[in-house]
Amino acid sequence: MERKLILKPPVIMITCLVFLIGSLVLSLPLYYGFLAGILFTSLVLFKSGYPLREIWETSLSALKDLKKLLIIILLIGATTSMWLASGVVPTIMYYGFTYMEGLNFLLAAFLIMCLVSYFMGTAVGSISTVGISLSGIGLSMGIPHSMMVGVLVSGAFIADKISPLSGLLNLTMATVNKNYKEVFKSMIKTLLPTIIITSVIYFFMGRNYIAEGQNLLKYKEAIRQGFNVSPALFILPALVLILSISGLDSLKTFSIGIIAGGALSIIFQKISLSSVIKALLFGYRGNTPSEELNALLVSGGMVSMIEATFMVAGAFILIKLFERGNVLVPFMDKLTRGI
């Protein structure tokens, strides 16, 4: 039965937008804005003749559809902790710094950021760890700050687009109901030429900036003293890559990667099982002689991702309620008119 809303759809959407902006202005978590929007929209639907049961079931159906993605978001926090605790990220940094010696620094920094971002699954996390280290080295070599930032950001975000551990990519896959193998084949066609063209540009831009061993030595020494660095640790990123490309379900890939990361933490870094569990839940912080490096090797664990799950859940529930009340129909009609 067609029900007439007591408020016009634009009024409902603008009010919800005001709630979101208000939460930002008041420095409140964004999920408070979504919660206010959900309550407001639910009240409008109820006053417009929608039964409470129908509104409640709509909200539950949104959470049910989103259940897998919410679990993956939590596992992303755990995965980052395991990649740090097991020594995988420090090992990538160590060997990356080693092979950078004598090379074109801008090109090497770009490629390292692509690699780290791909296996960490987060552009922001990659920039705040490896990126800051590379930035410090680059600035000490006289590379302009704006140029260095451009190299790091482009490397991190290019790789983040196809990382099997990326929250954004997993959200996309859940939305379009595609597995990683299908998405990878589709995106690599445009991404690979982009990486090649960008690499050529940085090759010519960075010909006068050659990485010197002295600039990299302090980071390598700190990593060596804080972690057991071994090529064997590349087993973890290789395993995750193989499982992802083979088309294995993302949830299973994350779970296997976390278990493998925990095992490597115990075997290679001699971390106790209780410490591994603590890192999974509450995060990890590096323990090297360099406080500067320790401040970079940080992860918040699963707990740090709870706010993100609330925001995603709030957004999906609000969209479902909009769909139930046909709030978006007039807006979509105007957008598609004439197509």
Image: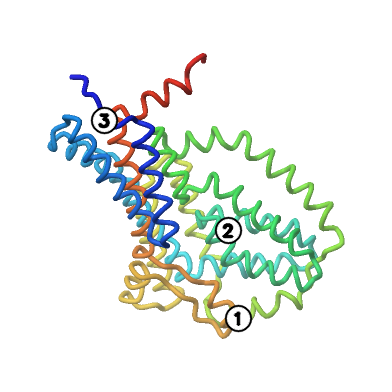
Q: Which comes before the other along the chain, label 3 or label 1?
A: 1
Q: Which comes before the other along the chain, label 2 or label 1?
A: 2
Q: In this view, does 9 lie to the left or right of 184?
A: left
Determine whether the residue tagged by mark 1 lies in a helix, strand or loop.
Answer: helix
Residue 208 image position (x, y, % from top left): 87, 62
Q: Residues within 10 Å of mark 1 (few under 14, many from 20)?
A: many
Residue 185 image position (x, y, % from top left): 54, 34
Q: In which quarter of the image is the N terminus?
A: top left
| Residue 33 higher or lower than 213, as above or below | above
State how far apart marks 3 and 1 are (Cα).
56 Å
Residue hosting label 1: 222
| Residue 7 higher or lower than 142, as above or below | above
Q: Which comes before the other along the chain, label 2 or label 3?
A: 2
Decide: marks 2, 3 in contact (CB < 8 A)? no
| Mark sitting on residue 324 | 3
Residue at image position (79%, 64%) is: 144
Choose between 200 and 125: the one closer to the eye. Answer: 125
State how far apart marks 2 and 3 are (Cα).
42 Å
| Residue 287 higher or lower than 131, as above or below | below
Q: How crowded is mark 2: few (under 14 residues within 10 Å), some or many (20 or more)?
A: many
Choose between 267 and 112: the one closer to the eye. Answer: 112
Residue 327 image position (x, y, % from top left): 33, 30
Determine whether the residue tagged by mark 2 lies in a helix, strand or loop.
Answer: helix
Q: Which amino acid does label 1 sit on?
A: Ala
Residue 91 image position (x, y, % from top left): 57, 68
Q: Which colour scheme is used?
A: rainbow
Residue hosting label 2: 116
Residue at image position (54%, 82%) is: 288
Nearest to viewer (mark 3 / mark 1): 3
Residue at image position (38%, 23%) is: 330
Q: Residues within 10 Å of mark 3 (few under 14, many from 20)?
A: some
